[in-house]
């Protein structure tokens, strides 16, 4: 783990040093802009943006190390699909953090040249994400990545509204989750749901809904290695149970 952390910090330092420090400083020098003599509202706002962007980027780096067991570098990627930390809200938070830092520098210096560089940075990263990163992740992580992609947007952190299951759909939904669990080797968990789905065929009591909710919650807690698509289905079903029991 320590070696992974050292590699990640090294790559991050090189990226930040070149993309977020060296190149913007070149733009500032070429455009003849000097550091503001006084610190006004644009400078304070710029420093806040730089700080927020840096914190987001560092959060991403440590998430890659401790959750993904890898680094943000394309040539030394995580061993596991990273969908926690800032990646719960948007699929490319590291690039967003870097872009915010650049936008903050543009605001601090009130520089159109750095603003242009910020736009160019987002354009290049967007093309890189669309034509390289996403196809690579799809090949590497398959259905897990597709399920994550369906839930979380690429750039804008707006959560998709989940369609909740109706009570009459529960047996079919549980059957589908059970079959997925069994096909991925989670036999004990699949058998537990198999028993519950047969009980639901003849009762819809709140007690059974509660038992089902507890079983699903325990599966999520005990099996941290659940594939992302199964975890998402279990989460949706638990929300559906809560919604139904609230209005009964």
Image (spheres, grey):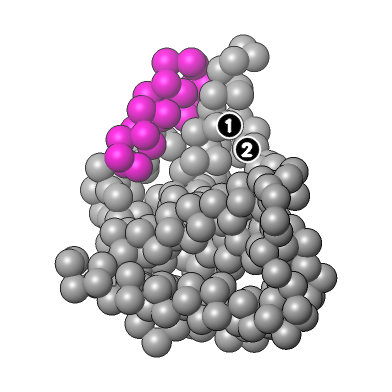
Q: Residue at x 38, y 58 (%)?
A: 63
Q: Name the image quarter holding residue 114.
A: bottom right
The label on residue 149 is none
* Horizontal and vertical percent position of residue 166: 65, 33
* Residue under the image location 54 percent in, 74 percent down: 21
Marker count (numbered): 2
What is the residue that sits farthest to the left in this orientation? 2
* Above or below for 205 versus 123: above
Q: Do the residues labelled 2 and 1 touch (CB within 8 Å)?
A: yes
Is 163 colored magenta in this rendering?
A: no
Q: Which quadrant is home to the N terminus?
A: bottom left
The secondary structure that dominates the magenta segment is helix
Q: Residue at x 35, y 55 (%)?
A: 226
Residue shown at 58% from the left, 86% from the top: 132
- Whether the magenta-drawn stretch holds residue 208 is answered as yes
Reading the image, the residue beneath label 1 is: 240
Residue 117 visible = no
Nearer to me, 81 or 50: 50
Q: Which of 117 and 184 is in front in this view?
A: 117
Q: Distance between the residues labelled 2 and 1?
A: 6 Å
Left or right: 227 in relation to 134:
left
Residue 19 is situated, as x and y percent measured from the top left of the image, at 56, 78
Secondary structure type for disc 1? helix
Question: In this view of the protein, can residue 166 be seen by the observer?
Answer: yes
In the image, residue 196 above or below residue 194: above
Horizontal relation, residue 52 to residue 68: left or right: right
Q: Where 53 sits versus 121, above or below? A: above
Relative height, residue 99 to residue 151 (above, below): below
Residue span colored magenta: 199-221
Q: Is 29 placed left or right of 94 in the picture? A: right
Residue with the mark numbered 2:
165
- Figure quadrant of the C terminus: top right
């Amino acid at each position: 783990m320590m070696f992974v952390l050292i590699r990640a910090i090294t790559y991050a330092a090189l990226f930040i040093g070149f993309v977020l420090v060296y190149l913007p400083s070149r733009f500032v020098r070429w455009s003849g802009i000097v550091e503001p003599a006084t610190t006004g509202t644009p400078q304070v706002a710029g420093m806040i943006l730089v700080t927020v962007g840096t914190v987001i980027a560092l959060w991403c780096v440590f998430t890659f190390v401790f959750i993904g067991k890898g680094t943000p570098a394309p040539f030394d990627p995580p061993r596991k699909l990273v969908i926690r930390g800032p990646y719960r809200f948007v699929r490319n938070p590291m690039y967003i953090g870097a872009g915010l830092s650049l936008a903050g520098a543009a605001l601090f210096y009130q520089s159109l040249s750095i603003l242009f560089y910020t736009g160019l940075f987002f354009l290049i990263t967007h093309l890189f994400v669309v034509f390289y990163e996403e196809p690579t992740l799809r090949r590497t992580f398959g259905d897990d990545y597709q399920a994550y992609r369906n839930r979380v947007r690429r750039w804008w952190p707006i959560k998709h509204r989940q369609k909740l299951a109706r009570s009459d759909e529960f047996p079919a939904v549980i059957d589908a989750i059970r079959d997925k669990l069994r096909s991925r080797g989670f036999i004990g968990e699949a058998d537990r749901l198999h028993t519950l789905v047969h009980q639901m065929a003849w009762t819809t009591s709140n007690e059974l809904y509660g038992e089902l909710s507890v079983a699903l919650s325990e599966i999520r807690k005990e099996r941290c290695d659940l594939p992302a698509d199964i975890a998402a289905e279990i989460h949706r079903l638990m929300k559906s149970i809560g919604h139904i029991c609230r209005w009964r």
